[in-house]
């Protein structure tokens, strides 16, 4: 099985009243609603919120740096591919801590800064998105979470850098495969499985990762 879908992990582990920061059009909120999990979304974009509300989802406009909720309200905060877009990541994390109840949990998914730079160097790729302001290696994000008052940081999922595998194979295919698509597919599958196992042990080499932390 080659699944490394962080949505599945977040849906399974989220509990209580859930806040989805940067909810967008409500993709993860819709998945959570299928399991009758209570979720409120917040996003800065009115156009995204309009689409989410059409789906019958509960969401409001707000700035991630100044969450429009009182203290100790939520059991879970979700921020998937959000923190890299923010001007002040530490303030955002402190806001998440503020609105969480004691022993509440936060899930953050974000690209790995190191792999972004490696990909740029190897493939002349311009980057994930031009609007990314901050990217972090797992150790850096863990440090930010600590400063914001969280404990028990853990990487739950690390995505393998498949671009690196594609880069290597694109330069070796004439030697290994001799135009055999079947052999190339089998070889790719084996290498991908091996890469997933390796990245689980060394998330600092992941393409992106999902981190969990707890409010004490």
Image (cartoon, rainbow, N blue to C red):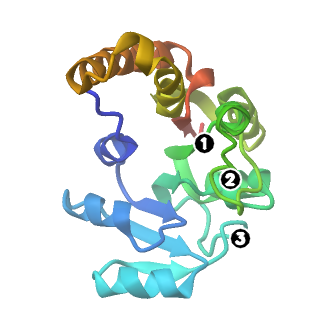
Do the residues under discs 2 and 1 have CB atoms within 8 angstroms?
yes
108 lies left or right of 7: right
Visible residue check, residue 103: no
Q: Residue at x 49, y 19 (%)?
A: 199
The image shows residue 109 at horizontal and vertical percentages of 53, 45
Vertical order, 147 against 189 (above or below): below
Identify the secondary structure beneath mark 2. helix
Visible residue check, residue 199: yes
Q: Which residue is mark 1?
A: 111
CA gap, disc 1 and disc 3: 23 Å
Question: Which picture quadrant has residue 72?
Answer: bottom right
Vertical order, 157 against 124 (above or below): above
Badge 1 density bin: few <14, some 14–19, many ≥20, Cα 10 Å: many
Q: Nearer the viewer, mark 3 or mark 2?
A: 2
Task: Name the mark on residue 66.
Answer: 3
Task: Name the mark on residue 84.
Answer: 2
Do the residues under discs 3 and 2 have CB atoms within 8 angstroms?
no
């Amino acid at each position: 099985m080659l699944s490394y879908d962080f949505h599945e992990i977040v849906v399974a582990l989220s509990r209580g009243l859930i806040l989805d920061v940067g909810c967008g059009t409500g993709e993860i909120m819709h998945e959570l609603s299928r399991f009758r999990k209570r979720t409120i979304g917040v996003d800065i974009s009115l156009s995204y919120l309009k689409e989410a509300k059409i789906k019958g989802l509960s969401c409001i406009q707000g700035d991630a740096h100044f969450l429009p909720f009182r203290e100790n309200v939520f059991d879970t905060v979700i921020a998937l591919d959000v923190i890299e877009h923010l001007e002040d990541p530490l303030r955002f994390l402190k806001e998440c801590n503020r609105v969480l109840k004691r022993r509440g949990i936060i899930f953050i998914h974000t690209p790995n800064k190191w792999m972004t730079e490696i990909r740029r160097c190897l493939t002349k790729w311009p980057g994930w998105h031009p609007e990314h302001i901050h990217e972090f290696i797992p150790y850096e994000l863990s440090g930010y979470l600590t400063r914001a008052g969280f404990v028990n940081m853990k990487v739950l999922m690390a995505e393998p850098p498949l671009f690196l595998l594609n880069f290597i194979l694109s330069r070796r295919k004439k030697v290994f495969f001799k135009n055999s698509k079947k052999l190339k597919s089998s070889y790719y599958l084996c290498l991908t499985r091996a890469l997933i196992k390796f990245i689980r042990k060394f998330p600092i080499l992941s393409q992106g990762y999902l981190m969990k932390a707890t409010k004490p």
